[in-house]
Amino acid sequence: MNRSNARGQVSYRVKRRLSVLGQFYWQRTHGGLRLGSPPPADLEFPGEVNAPDLWYQHDRLLRDNYWRAGGGLNYSLRQLDLFAAYTVFVAGTDTHAGRAITIGFTVPFRLGGLHR
């Protein structure tokens, strides 16, 4: 499976420690199997995923094309950054439609022996 991917993110610092961000994700699969849709679609479910062996591997084999977009917040503390993001499905074919909430933190570290 060959895929082309793009991802972009823009952030804006609202205050010294607080930033807001916008992001997008795009994927185009070159080849792959089509899953189909319920009638009256041109290609009815299960589409080209019509054997047990193909069903077990369908997530890897699908022609997964999508646009996703989202936004979030980042808050910087002295020794770590806290972040939260919300991502939604915008458009696509043979992909997972839905929403995602991501919450986490990042901790910077220094490599030993490197001083500035």
Image: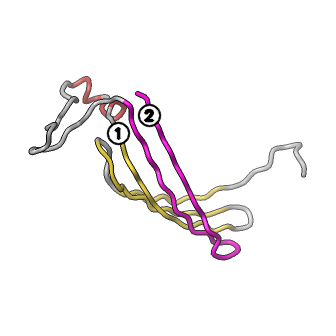
Q: Is residue 19 left or right of residue 31?
A: right
Q: Quadrant of the N terminus?
A: top left
**Residue interval drawn in magenta:** 1-30
Give the percent coordinates (x, y) of residue 29: 39, 35
Q: Evaluate if marks 2 and 1 touch, with contact meaning CB atoms under 8 Å apart.
A: yes
Q: Identify the disc placed on residue 64.
A: 1
Q: Is residue 21 left or right of residue 101?
A: right
> As drawn, which residue projects farthest toward the left?
40
- The kind of secondary structure element at disc 2 is strand
Q: Quadrant of residue 99?
A: bottom left
Q: Quadrant of residue 94?
A: top left
Q: Which residue is mark 2?
A: 3
- What amino acid type is highlighted by mark number 1? Asp
Q: Is residue 14 magenta?
A: yes
Q: Is residue 27 magenta?
A: yes
Q: Is residue 50 above or below residue 26?
A: above
Q: Is residue 50 above or below residue 88?
A: above
